[in-house]
Image (cartoon, rainbow, N blue to C red):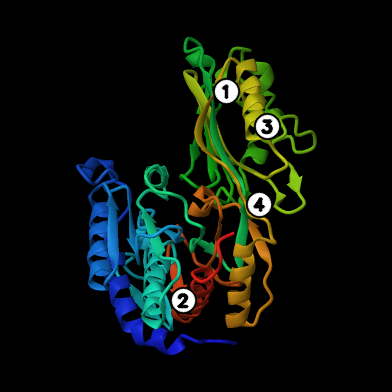
């Protein structure tokens, strides 16, 4: 295994940990109640940007700010350039009591770093900043490097829209916001609500459905109550991230079985919004027929997925929320058309919450060949490209992939309690990134 820059990486480890401690200490989740001039996503994210800017200037880099939406840290102004796309915002650590230590205090236990953002994405961001520092100290670069940092990756992504409306695309780029070895495929994301207006006047005959859910996760529980029932019924599943619904258990199956057993479809009036909700769900989650074309398999990208993320209704209105991660075998326009037809058939409508195009870079591209060589040189492991259901900034790029930081077999707990990052792993990742950048900044333009 070739560790050309191990000494330099170890020499900067203390500074890296100091900077990571400071950045983790900033609660940089979206908070529009504190938004203002040059702080469109809130004071916390603006504070994190300012901290990063000051550190980058201290290290001798140029900094280009984009009105609080994004910034880039660059080695020069020339074009073309090599890009690294990271984000400084995080999800909020809402259930702090589930953490083994304060999520906003960087903590090291047995060589593992804990804290909100250590893996997603503050740790990789700073590791790449130091990777650029080490490389520029070692040699003169043919192409400049830009570390492009966004402030709304966990939410709207308008940060990258803002940046690339004002700057050209990089020649090649990667986003260290995924997994190793190389993520060349990210499934498309289509999140929608099917909304059904209620009849209102039949409230006394109606039942109500409520749910336990959290953004980014599958539905965890359903509760049914109302005058038609003698007691409140509850159906418990197991939540999972909505991009991995197979890792959880949906309560919908048990609820639908109970609904049929109680023969509620014969009791509820045809105009019942809850009845419409249940009938729409039957069609949506009929895996045998898949009448809406929501489930498909791609030879390179694997299977699509369909997750139920919301299911509630009473006599006034009902909502059914789904998260589709689709492959090249599907058309988002056609799926949306089919969903609209379904909703309108029950007097409802479709509201799109998120629509992000998929990422797919061919395996034989020069970018992937370069990253593959660097990864194998450092780790000694064979490289296979991956397709994931998650999203990174790589899908905003013309020529980009997700590349690290999580190695095979590691559990990062991003978005969950006890988010973690192995110190040894991030040092190895830094070596991989430095060697990749070394080749990319010397390569001839395609």
Whichever of callouts 1 and 4 sits on the residue coming sooner in the sequence is: 4
Looking at the figure, which quarter contains the N terminus? bottom right
Tell me the distance, in whole angstroms, between the alpha carbons under discs 1 and 4.
26 Å
Residue carrying label 1: 274
Residue 126 appears anywhere in the view: yes
Whichever of callouts 2 and 3 sits on the residue coming sooner in the sequence is: 3
Residue 347 lies, with reference to residue 79, above or below; the image says above
| Residue contact at pointers 4 and 2, CB within 8 angstroms | no
What numbered label is drawn on residue 246?
A: 4
Quadrant of the image occupied by residue 53: bottom left
**Pointer 1: residues within 10 angstroms few (<14), some, or many (20+)?**
many
Q: Secondary structure at mark 1?
A: helix
Whichever of callouts 1 and 3 sits on the residue coming sooner in the sequence is: 1
Tell me the distance, in whole angstroms, between the alpha carbons under discs 3 and 4.
16 Å
In the image, 4 versus 122, the foreground residue is: 4
Residue 94 appears anywhere in the view: no
Q: Nearer the viewer, mark 4 or mark 2?
A: 2
Side (left or right) of 26 relative to 74: left
**Pointer 2: residues within 10 angstroms few (<14), some, or many (20+)?**
many
Q: Nearer the viewer, mark 1 or mark 2?
A: 2
Tell me the distance, in whole angstroms, between the alpha carbons under discs 2 and 3.
44 Å
| Residue 365 image position (x, y, % from top left) | 65, 60
Residue carrying label 3: 284
Tell me the distance, in whole angstroms, between the alpha carbons under discs 1 and 2.
53 Å
What numbered label is drawn on residue 430?
A: 2
Tell me the distance, in whole angstroms, between the alpha carbons under discs 4 and 2.
33 Å
Whichever of callouts 1 and 2 sits on the residue coming sooner in the sequence is: 1
In the image, 16 versus 440, the foreground residue is: 440
Residue 236 lies, with reference to residue 267, above or below; the image says below
């Amino acid at each position: 295994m070739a560790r050309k820059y191990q000494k330099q990486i170890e020499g900067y480890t203390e500074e890296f940990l100091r900077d990571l401690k400071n950045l983790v200490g900033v609660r940089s989740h979206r908070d529009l109640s504190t938004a203002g001039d040059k702080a469109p996503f809130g004071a916390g994210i603006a504070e994190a940007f300012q901290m990063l800017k000051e550190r980058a200037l201290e290290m001798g880099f140029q900094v280009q700010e984009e009105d609080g939406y994004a910034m880039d840290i660059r080695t020069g102004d020339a074009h073309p350039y090599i890009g690294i796309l990271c984000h400084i915002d995080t999800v909020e650590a809402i259930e702090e009591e589930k953490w083994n230590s304060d999520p906003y205090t960087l903590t090291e236990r047995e060589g593992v770093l804990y804290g909100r953002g250590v893996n997603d994405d503050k740790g990789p961001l700073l590791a790449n900043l130091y990777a650029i520092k080490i490389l520029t100290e070692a040699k003169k670069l043919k192409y400049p490097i830009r570390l492009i940092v966004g402030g709304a990756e966990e939410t709207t992504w308008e940060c990258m829209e803002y940046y690339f409306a004002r700057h050209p695309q990089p020649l090649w780029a990667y986003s260290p916001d995924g997994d190793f070895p190389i993520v060349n495929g990210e499934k498309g994301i289509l999140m929608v609500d099917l909304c059904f207006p209620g009849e209102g006047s039949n409230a006394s005959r109606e039942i109500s459905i409520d749910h336990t859910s959290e953004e980014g996760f599958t539905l965890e529980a359903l509760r049914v109550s109302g005058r038609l029932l003698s007691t409140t019924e509850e159906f418990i599943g197991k939540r999972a991230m909505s991009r991995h619904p197979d890792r959880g258990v949906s309560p919908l199956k048990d609820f639908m079985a109970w609904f049929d057993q109680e023969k509620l479809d014969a009791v509820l009036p045809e105009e019942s919004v809850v009845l419409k909700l249940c009938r729409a769900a039957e069609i949506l989650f009929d895996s045998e027929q898949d009448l809406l074309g929501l489930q498909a398999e791609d030879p390179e990208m694997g299977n699509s997925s369909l997750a139920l993320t919301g299911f509630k209704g009473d006599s006034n209105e009902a909502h059914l929320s789904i998260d589709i991660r689709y492959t090249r075998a599907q058309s988002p326009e056609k799926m949306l058309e089919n969903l609209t037809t379904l909703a309108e058939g029950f007097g409802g409508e479709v509201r799109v919450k998120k629509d992000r195009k998929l990422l797919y870079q061919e395996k034989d591209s020069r970018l992937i060949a370069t990253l593959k060589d660097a990864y194998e040189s450092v780790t000694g492991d064979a490289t296979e490209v991956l397709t994931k259901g998650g999203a990174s900034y790589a899908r905003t790029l013309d020529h980009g992939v997700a590349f690290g930081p999580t190695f095979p077999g590691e559990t990062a707990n991003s978005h969950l309690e006890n988010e973690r990052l192995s110190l040894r792993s991030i040092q190895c990742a830094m070596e991989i990134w430095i060697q990749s950048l070394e080749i990319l900044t010397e390569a001839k333009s395609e």
